[in-house]
Amino acid sequence: MTRKGTINDLNIDFMGKTKLAGILSASALVICLLSILIRGFDFGLDFTGGTLIELGYEQPAELSDIRAALETEGLNAGTIQYFGARSDVLIRMAPQEDAEEDSAHLSDRVYRTLSKASAGAIELRRVEFVGPQVGEELREQGGLAILFSLIGILIYVALRFEWRFAVGAVVALIHDVLFTVGMFSIFQIPFDLTVLAAVLAVIGYSLNDTIVIFDRIRENFRRMRKGTVLGITNSSINQTLSRTIVTSGTTLLVLFALYFLGGEAISGFSLALIIGIVIGTYSTIYVATAVVIWLGLSRGDLMPVKKEGAELGALP
């Protein structure tokens, strides 16, 4: 009786496609960098400062009518969007020239204006104010958080494996971060603190996936006495493929549910994680591992170091 093949029996030549993957990655990163430099980000209230107002209508509201009512009173809202249902509205007001207007009277003016324009009652549910100075500090601290996390990962992987693996892991993580935030820049998706938190989570997820493959590569280099570097690397990736598919697949199922059903509050967070996990799974194979091989990995680099006098100590 013959055993049917399983996913663990696959022998896909991942490393044979590294040149094509490199061209695609380089092209995508150039587009993302150009968008970041030219278009920038649609920073949310957390980074720009301003006032956030959440309103609840009795009946579904039209965003165009809300914007028109505000403009008649000289109130230019930065963003008006639904916050879940069509009766829940979220308004983000850009910082005003008069700081006192921001903190004390702006939300009241908005509420009174929209109450007059609406046929039904409106509930003022939440008002948040963030000063421009606080927003600027958050941008700087967010960038430093990503930088320090990459430095810490570089040190950790170098100590656990070998410097080539550390460089490969960090290059892949930089690739993931640039691609994820680049998508937010290209499509001008609002970028707030929840998205920044998701980017940091992507770094951790991608690193975990990379470490699993690196561990298997090191194990196979010591176990397989015959075979080329590319052959052993391909075998290692194929052996961990089922784990990668199951882990990424189940995580994405949850994230898609959060994105489509979780409402506006976590849509940016879940979208950043969806992008990051997809690109992180790709970069683990075609960026991190490819960079390690390009740096000249050999079997001797992963062999355990023999202690001096170990052979003499084993003699009776």
Image (cartoon, helix red, strand yellow):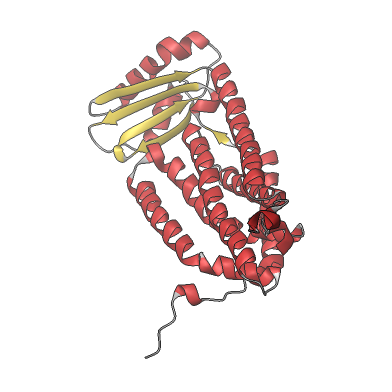
Work out which quarter of the rendered image holds the C terminus and state it.
Answer: bottom right
Q: Where is residue 12 in the image (x, y as percent from the top left)?
A: 58, 74
Q: Residue at 42% across / 33% down in the picture?
A: 80
Nearer the observer, 256 or 10: 10
Q: In this view, which residue lies farthest toward the right? A: 296
Q: Residue at 45% across / 57% down in the picture?
A: 248
Q: Is residue 31 visible?
A: no
Nearer the observer, 50 or 228: 228
234, above or below 69, in the image? below
Q: Residue at 71% across / 63% down in the picture?
A: 299
Is residue 219 found left or right of 244 in the rendered image? right
Nearer the observer, 9 or 140: 9
Q: In this view, which residue lies farthest toward the bottom? A: 1
Q: In which quarter of the image is residue 111?
A: top left
Q: Is residue 152 visible?
A: yes
Q: Residue at 70% across / 51% down in the picture?
A: 307
85, above or below 301, in the image? above
Q: Where is residue 230 in the image (x, y as percent from the top left)?
A: 68, 69
Q: In which quarter of the image is residue 138?
A: top right
Q: Where is residue 51 in the image (x, y as percent from the top left)?
A: 45, 21
Work out which quarter of the rendered image holds the N terminus and state it.
Answer: bottom left
93, above or below 29, in the image? above
